[in-house]
Image (cartoon, rainbow, N blue to C red):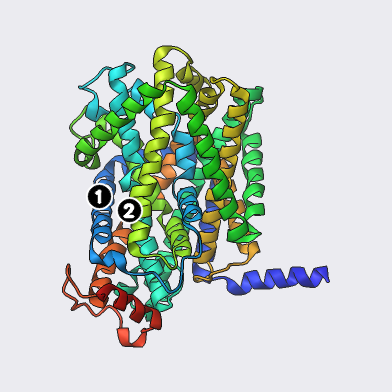
Amino acid sequence: MSGSSDTGIVSEFIDEIDPIPFVVGASVTVAFVLVAGFRTDWMSQQLNTAFQVFGQGLAWMYLGSMTALLVIGVYLMLSKYGRIKLGDGEPEYGYFSYVAMFFSAGLSAGIVFFGPVEALTHYSSLPPLFASGAEAGTQGAMVPALAYSIFHYGVHAWGGYLAIGIPVAYYAYNYGMPMRTSTAIAPLLGEENLDGIVGQIIDTLAVVATLGGIATGLGFISQQLLSGVTYRTGIQFGDIETIAAVVGITVIFTLSLVVGIDRGIKRLSDFNIVMMVVLLIVALVLGPTLSVLNTGVAALGTYVQNIGQMSFFTGMSADGGATWTSFWTVFYWSWWIAWAPFVGLFLARISKGRTVREVLFTALITMTGVSFVWFTVVGGTSMWLQNSGAVDILGAVGNFGNGVAGYVLFESFPLGDLWGTIFLILVITFFATSADSSTLAVAFLTTGGKEDPSSLNRVFWGVLQGVIASILIVLGGASALRTSVIITGAPFAIVCLVSFAYFLIRIGRDHEAIVFESGVEAFDRSEREVSTEEESVASVDD
């Protein structure tokens, strides 16, 4: 009986595979692992060179595209198109769980890792854009340092996700198209051509970009976990131990994913939010409360006042500015774009029954608000404690790496062991939810948009993601992780722009054009009409 069951699982896995994206994605991954294993020094040199070439050379593209996506998103949220409903019926998840899954998939790995340390890093070495206005390491440096952290996790961060997620959800739920990345540009390709060469290339690039993006996120969280263990116990991790530990952690999210999205991701996402709230309260109440709040409000004002300059600051006009921008802003923008295929598909999956405006409001307002509160309280407290001499977080970072900052911060409070343990648990569960949602998305991509890919498919990609993350850590740590997404994210900057632009054309055609004239024959509407479309048109016209 067991043998028959195992055969059935393997057969399901083989039958559901979309050959080209699966084979190419798996081959690229395995090739990277083999080359990195046998030519480690050479691979490290190539990653360093790529960081300089792509990070500085493509700054204009990343900065321009993310700002353009933001402008389109804001327009859609404020226009009458915001009332368009994604599919029929009521939303599948309550708003709290929806926000929790939204957040855990989109920001979790970065916000947990960089929350305690990014503002502190900018405080100790000011961003070039603000270097002339304050002295590093002083109270005057706190506001611009925190403002740049808010900028990196603010409204821009969601542009790529929305550019894939909203069009795919609209075409999938209102027109019955497959849940896959190439569906996002269906108006350009035509639905009948989604399985053609261009559609296959896009889905294949999505697999590669997703693997690079999530490997970076898992790599940072893994560094944070391992550095925390070293800091708290003194246990050191060599290359072999690092690979074994990171791949071993994949068991955590594998256990989550095999029980499905409702019992897995949803529960862990809800738990993450609760733990974050607990730690926020601890930092706010036990830290320098009033100073932190005042710094946060001032930083928000600086962010709003300078968002235009920050959006287009390539660093070419400042000494060392280009290097700084590629290390921070270009890295972040490329990371968000590299995550766009998997986060976009995941958001499309959980957004059925919601309006375009609800999705955009959740991303641009709710998520930015959450990021602002987290960075203000956690990052602001780190800076004030460092400035006052109450705790030397920068000293610990110098010895153990950026990942240790959160442990040092929370263990400096009364009952520090308890808060440090809770922070460690948060790191692990955020690791699980990020990896789980990304594995689901890669499974979507490699099965032609199958809504419920087999567990074996998801386990396969989960293990590969763990292997890539661990090897990147061994090859060059944070630098290698940053380089991987700057390279893999580049093609999707173009895909995201095309997707959102043609989405405007499509909904203009469906719901009366007010931006573009609807003369573009994207695909024959009469062949794709469904009852949900008629209902959504009626609701908009009303």
Whole-percent x and y of residue 311? 24, 42
Q: Residue at x 23, y 38 (%)?
A: 304
Residue placed under numbered mark 2 in the picture: 159
Mark found first going from the N terminus, 1 or 2: 1
Residue 193 is labelled as none
- Label 1 sits on a secondary structure element that is helix
- Label 2 sits on a secondary structure element that is helix
Q: Quadrant of the C terminus?
A: bottom left
* Relative height, residue 346 to residue 138 (above, below): below
Q: Residues within 10 Å of mark 2 (few under 14, many from 20)?
A: many
Residue placed under numbered mark 1 in the picture: 67
Cα separation, mark 1 vs mark 2, equals 8 Å
* Relative height, residue 490 to residue 234 (above, below): below
Hey, which quadrant is residue 295 in on the image?
top left
Tell me which amino acid carries mark 1: Thr
Q: Residues within 10 Å of mark 1 (few under 14, many from 20)?
A: some
* Relative height, residue 420 to residue 80 (above, below): above
Q: Residue at x 48, y 35 (%)?
A: 113
Please say whether residue 492 is visible from this viewpoint: no
Task: In the displayed orientation, state which residue is furthest to the right.
Answer: 1
Residues at discs 1 and 2 in contact (Cβ within 8 Å): yes
Whole-percent x and y of residue 367? 39, 47
Whole-percent x and y of residue 334? 36, 47
